Amino acid sequence: MLIDTDSPDKVTPTRWGHRMRIKALMLAGVLAAGSWVSDGAAAPPATRLYVRTIPSGATVQLDGKELGQSDGLFTVQPGTHTVRVELDGQTPHESRLDVTAGQITRLVVEFQALPAASTRPGRGEDGGDAGGRALAGWLSRADVDSQIRQAMLTVLRQHPDQTRWSGRSGGVLFGLACKRMPTGPAGDQAGPAVMNLTHLLAVQELLKAKSLLDQYASAGLTDASTLGQALAQAAGKFRVEGEVKSFHFKSAVHEGWATAYVLAQEQDLAAHLQTPASVETVRLAYRDAMHLQARELMKRGNHADALLLWKHLHSRKLVSQGLYLDAARCFVGLGQKADALRLLSEAVDAFAESGAGEFFEQAGDLALTIDLPAAQELAEKAYRRASQELLNVVTPATQPAGDVPLEPVEKPQ
């Protein structure tokens, strides 16, 4: 859960556990309409809104007027609009979107079922707010600046059902986390691990502060949801402890909960996260997080949407061997054989020196599924590269792999 009190209008609080969560993914920087690989002249692009929901079949409203059902592509007027999606048994979601003329703006909403009213424990019980109350009780006596403490307690009061929070007090950013401690014999063994995990969860929240995310826009990492995932995944690689001079943390067990806070000066954190090594770490984590999203879309047969994510990464030079293969599979799934073949050929050439044997083998297998004459030649090329990579592994060091010739392929009579 992210709270940045400098920009409350951009924060959509969610509830942890007993309260349903909605995750919305909006590709920052709208993607141009039309196919990325289309040849020839195209008609002037329309201004459209693409809405996908999980599950699908939700009613889509634009500025109070019904457009249709998800998943769907709707022609709209450019400008700022209020989009609302509703589905029986789910909590409605509402977003304010800036729709750019001549482009497609995407909105993806993941619903979760509403919990039964009787299943949520009341306040004072060991329910959704128990961890927040335990953390607040500990913070009220913790050795921390009074102004910062007040900002922390304010965040907890605003969102009592969470187990992770972040916010700011002036130029100081902070992250908070709590987790129920195990009891009995298990607690003796797992307790220290739970304490360490709680501390790292607080660090994650600290690094997801909006002001820190915004600084990666210059690196092309403009999808806020994916960037948040990337920073969470890469949090352990930044080594903020010991590297950021103003970094401070504390943890304790209070009322049966592991509780922790971390804080640091925003300018110190920003400087550390903008080092070349840190930026590259975030870029690779961003690529991998979006690749996983694309694969989920592929599992649902949504190859066109997966290709939009591929384009987003490809335009930022955030590609990998697996991404090339998956993008080619999407083109095959859409029946665009020539595009699939062109992409496979680009991939085999791009990774000619660094590609793994498995990559070349899969590229060859995929090429054989494309019913085009040039695909056979590409498959042979890929298989020969795969064979060479395997020879580099199994050939003794005393005999260079290049000295072992490949047997010619005998063609049937």
Image (cartoon, grey):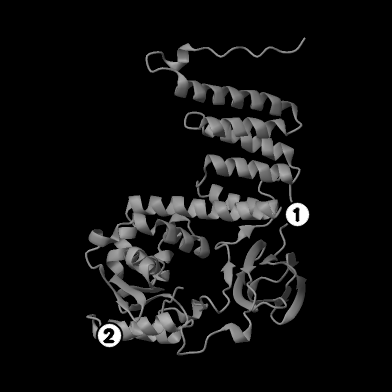
Q: Position of residue 219 (x, y in %)?
A: 44, 55
Q: Which residue is mark 2?
A: 147
Q: Position of residue 125 (x, y in %)?
A: 47, 87
- 234 w.r.t. 188: above or below: above
- 79 w.r.t. 281: above or below: below
Q: Position of residue 216 (x, y in %)?
A: 42, 60
Quarter of the image where one finds residue 247: bottom left
Q: Position of residue 60 (x, y in %)?
A: 72, 74
Whole-number angstrom distance, CA of label 1 to CA of label 2: 58 Å
Circle 1: element type? loop
User: Tag 2: residue type?
Assistant: Gln
CB under 8 Å between discs 1 and 2:
no
- In the displayed structure image, the side of residue 310 where residue 333 appears, left or right: right
Residue drawn at (32%, 67%) of the image: 188
* In this rendering, the label closer to the viewer, 1 or 2: 2
Mark positioned earlier in the residue sequence (1 or 2)? 1
Q: Which mark is residue 218?
A: none
Residue closest to the eye, 38 or 209 = 209
- In the displayed structure image, the side of residue 89 where residue 179 appears, left or right: left
Residue closest to the eye, 164 or 339 = 164
Q: Is residue 42 visible?
A: yes
Residue closest to the eye, 392 or 215 = 392
Quarter of the image where one finds residue 100: bottom right
Q: Which residue is at the far top? A: 413
Q: Which residue is mark 1?
A: 43
- In the displayed structure image, the side of residue 8 where residue 190 appears, left or right: left
Q: Which image quadrant: the C terminus? A: top right
Residue drawn at (29%, 81%) of the image: 148
User: Tag 1: residue type?
Assistant: Ala
Residue closest to the eye, 102 or 183 = 183
